[in-house]
Amino acid sequence: MAAADRDPTEPWWKAAVVYQIYPRSFADADGDGVGDLQGIRSKLPHLEWLGVDALWLSPFYRSPMADFGYDVSDYCDVDPIFGTLADFDELVADAHARGIRVIVDWVPNHTSDQHPWFVESRSSRESAKRDWYVWRDRTPDGAPPNNWVQTWTDGEPAWTVDPQTDQWYLHLFLPEQPDLNWRNPEVRAAMADVLRFWLDRGVDGFRMDVLHALGKDPDLADDPAELIPIPHSALNHHESTHEIVRELRSVLEEYDGDRMMVAEIFLLDTELVASYYDGGAGVHLAFNFPPLFAPWAARPWAVRIDEVARMIEPQGWPSWVLSNHDQPRHRTRYGSEARARAAAVLLLGLKGTPFLYAGEELGLEDAVVPEDRVVDPGGRDGCRAPIPWTVEGDHGWGRAEGLDTPWLPWPPDAAERSAEALRADEGSILHLYRRLLAARRASTALRLGDQAMVDAPDDVLAWDRTGAGGDRRRVIVNFGSSTVDVSTLVEGWAVEVASADGALGTDGALAADAAVLLRPT
C-alpha cells in the first residue's frame, strides 16, 4: 500500500491485503520443477499489479521435507531447493521497493528430528539439550504416556519410543517433528533469537504455526475420551501459552516499523481464538477458521460474522481467509466460479485483514493427484498444485530438459486459468480481484471502517462499512440459487464492483451466487 494511502495512526497490517505464497508451487526460476525464491521475485510485478500489500511466505528453511518445510532442521538458513540467504535478501529488498511487506512462516511448536537440537537431545538422557524436548519414561505396560493422538493418522499416539535412550518423545505431528519444550527458558531464548535473525533481515512479521500448541499441560493429562481420535494439536489450549505469546510480542516490539505476528490458532471455537489477542498484549492477528469451514449459505455465514463481531472485535482486529495450503481451495469447496467470485467480494468487503492464497485470484480448483504422485502426509497435495503462469507449454515454469512435470500435477484447465490468459480477459476473476483490491485501497470504510449488518431477504447477507470522513460502502451477497429482489437495499447506491457482469439488474434483482460492492450515489 502506498504511503499516501495509509492512515499513519494505524499499523499497516490492519489495512493490508496479505497474499500467501507456498514457495514450492508458486514460480520456478531454475527449472527443477520446484518453486523457489528467485521465482517468487520474478513474479513481484504480477503481485504489484494485482495490488496486494504484503506477502506471507510458507516455510523455505532447511528441511528434510517430511512435512515439506514444516519440519525445520535449520531456522536460520534457506533450503538449497529454494535458493540462498542472498536470494531471500534480494526478494525482501525488491518487495519493499514495490511497497510490499514480507511476512515469513515460523514453526515454533516442533523441529525436524534432524535439527541439531534434537540430535543432541536424543543422544543421551544426560544431554544438555535433553529438556529442550518432551521426554517421558517407558511404563511397565508399554503404553504411551497419555492418550494424545498425532495429526494425519488414524488414532496413532503422539508419542514415539526413541531406541537410543529408551524413552518416549512427544510429537503432535509426525514422528519426524518432535515437539519443543517451551517450559524450558533456554528454548524460549533460542527461538527469540530466531525471530531476531529474520527481523534483522528486514521481515515485517511472522505467521506463527500452531501457536496455541506451545504451552502444554505439565501433567500431560489425557484428553477426554469422547474427543478421541481428534488430534491433540486441535485440542491443546493451555493458559501457559499466553505468557509465551506475550514474550514473543515483546521481541517484535524491540523493532520499529509495526512488526506483526499472525497466529494459526487451529481451535474451532472463535471465543478461544479471541483469547489469544490477550486484550492487546497477545497476537496482532489470529486466523479464525470456523468461517473457512462454513458452507456456501447465508445463515452459517451470518453466524460466523456475528461471532467475530462479538468475540474477536472486543479483543482485537479480525482476519479472514477462504483458502490456504492446508485446506481445499474455496472454488473446489463451493462448487462453481460464480460462487468463488461472490466469495471474493464477501472476503474483501468484511471488516478485518483479508488473506488471499496464491491462485485464488485465478479461480483455481484443486488438482486431481494420482495415487502414485501423492506426497503429502496430510493429503493436501490438491490445493498445493503449481500456479500456471502462461498459456503454452510448461506454463512458465521453464522446466529442465527431461523433466515432464513440476513436483505436483497442474490444477484443472491450467492453460485457461493461467495468469497470462486471465490477464488478457477484462471480465476474468483475476481482474475482479484487482478491482476489489483497488476499491479497498481507495476506501477508508473498507480498509479500516466499522461494520453493521443490514436486514436482507432470505439467502442474502448485507452490511455497511463506514470510515473516516464519512466514507461509506455497502456489500450485498446472494448465497441462494435464485435471483433475489434487493431493490430496497440498493436505493441511493451505485455498483462499484460486481462479482460478474450484470449481477445486479436495473430492476434491483441480484443474480444467484452473486455479490456487489456499492458506493453512495
Image (spheres, rainbow, N blue to C red):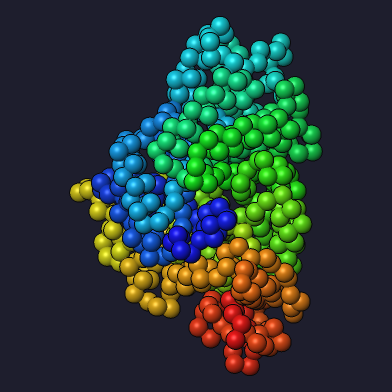
Q: Residue furthest bottom?
A: 507
Which residue extends farthest top? 126
On the image, the x and y values in percent for residue 495 come to: 56, 82
Q: Is residue 456 above or below residue 365?
A: below
At 53% from the left and 10% from the top, the residue drawn is 128
**Rendering quarter of residue 244:** top right
In which quadrant of the rendered view does residue 392 lie? bottom left
Q: Residue at x 75, y 61 (%)?
A: 306
The spot of residue 314 in percent (x, y) is: 74, 53
Q: Is residue 305 left or right of residue 106?
A: right
Relative height, residue 263 to residue 496 (above, below):
above
Q: Is residue 514 above or below residue 177?
A: below
Nearest to the observer: residue 372 or residue 97: 97
Compared to residue 215, the image places residue 38 above or below, namely below
The total number of labels drawn is 0
Compare residues 120 and 316 and report the one nearer the observer: 316
Q: Which quadrant of the figure has residue 319?
A: bottom right
Q: Position of residue 463 (x, y in %)?
A: 69, 72
Q: Is residue 219 left or right of residue 291?
A: right
Determine the residue positioned at 37% across, 46% down.
92
Q: Is residue 340 something one can see in this rendering?
A: no
Quarter holding the C terminus? bottom right
Residue at the image point whose x is 49% and y is 24% from the top: 113
Q: Is residue 502 visible?
A: yes
User: How far across and down, in percent of the image, does residue 477 sit?
Assistant: 64, 74
